[in-house]
Image: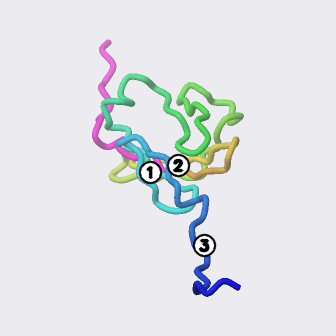
């Protein structure tokens, strides 16, 4: 007979968190906020989904890879876009649009 007191194993596989890039913040279960002002994203165009690694690219207009769920506008400028990765279902909130005012095209 074992005289040691019973200690349940309370650890779960989800406690092992993979490190997210510095431009990504976890804001809930399968929900992430992505700061587009990060130098690691600027000029690159696409970025990996924080959960599954699928490349999310603004060039993909087919909605095969992701679906646009919502957009938020502040003072007639795009402030936030909420996407859903079609591969894993994660919701991604893209921020940082207001940091970069659109340049007028030269005529």
Residue interval drawn in magenta: 92-107
Residue highlighted by disc 2: 92
* Residue toward you, 14 or 77: 14
* Residue toward you, 9 or 50: 9
Q: Position of residue 60 (x, y in %)?
A: 61, 28
Of callouts 3 and 2, which one flags the residue occurring earlier in the amino acid sequence? 3
Secondary structure of residue under mark 1: strand
Q: Is residue 88 above or below residue 48?
A: below
Label 3 to label 2, Cα distance in Å? 33 Å
Q: Is residue 73 above or below residue 46?
A: below
Q: Going 58% across and 86% down the picture, which residue do you hit? A: 5
Q: Is residue 93 above or below residue 56?
A: below
Q: Going 33% across and 31% down the picture, which residue do you hit? A: 102
In the rendered image, which quarter is residue 19 located in? top left
Residue highlighted by disc 1: 33
Of callouts 3 and 1, which one flags the residue occurring earlier in the amino acid sequence? 3
Residue contact at pointers 1 and 2, CB within 8 angstroms: yes
Query: Residue 18 lies in magenta, yes or no?
Result: no
Q: Going 39% across and 48% down the picture, which residue do you hit? A: 79
Secondary structure of residue under mark 3: loop
Secondary structure of residue under mark 2: strand
Q: Position of residue 7 (x, y in %)?
A: 58, 80
Q: Residues within 10 Å of mark 3 (few under 14, many from 20)?
A: few
Residue highlighted by disc 3: 9
3 vs 1, front mark: 3
In the rendered image, which quarter is residue 9 located in? bottom right
Q: Going 56% across and 25% down the picture, which residue do you hit? A: 59
Q: Is residue 79 left or right of residue 14?
A: left
Q: Position of residue 98 (x, y in %)?
A: 31, 43
Quarter holding the N terminus? bottom right
Quarter holding the C terminus? top left
């Amino acid at each position: 007979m074992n005289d040691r007191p019973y200690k349940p194993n309370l650890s779960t596989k989800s406690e092992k968190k993979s490190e997210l890039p510095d431009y990504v913040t976890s804001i809930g279960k399968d929900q992430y906020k992505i700061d587009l002002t990060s130098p690691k994203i600027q000029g690159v165009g696409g970025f990996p989904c924080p959960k599954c690694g699928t490349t999310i690219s603004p060039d993909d207009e087919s909605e095969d890879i992701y679906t646009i769920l919502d957009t938020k506008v502040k003072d007639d400028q795009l402030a936030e876009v909420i996407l859903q990765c079609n591969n894993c279902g994660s919701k991604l909130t893209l921020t940082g649009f207001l940091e970069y005012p659109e340049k007028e095209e030269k005529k």
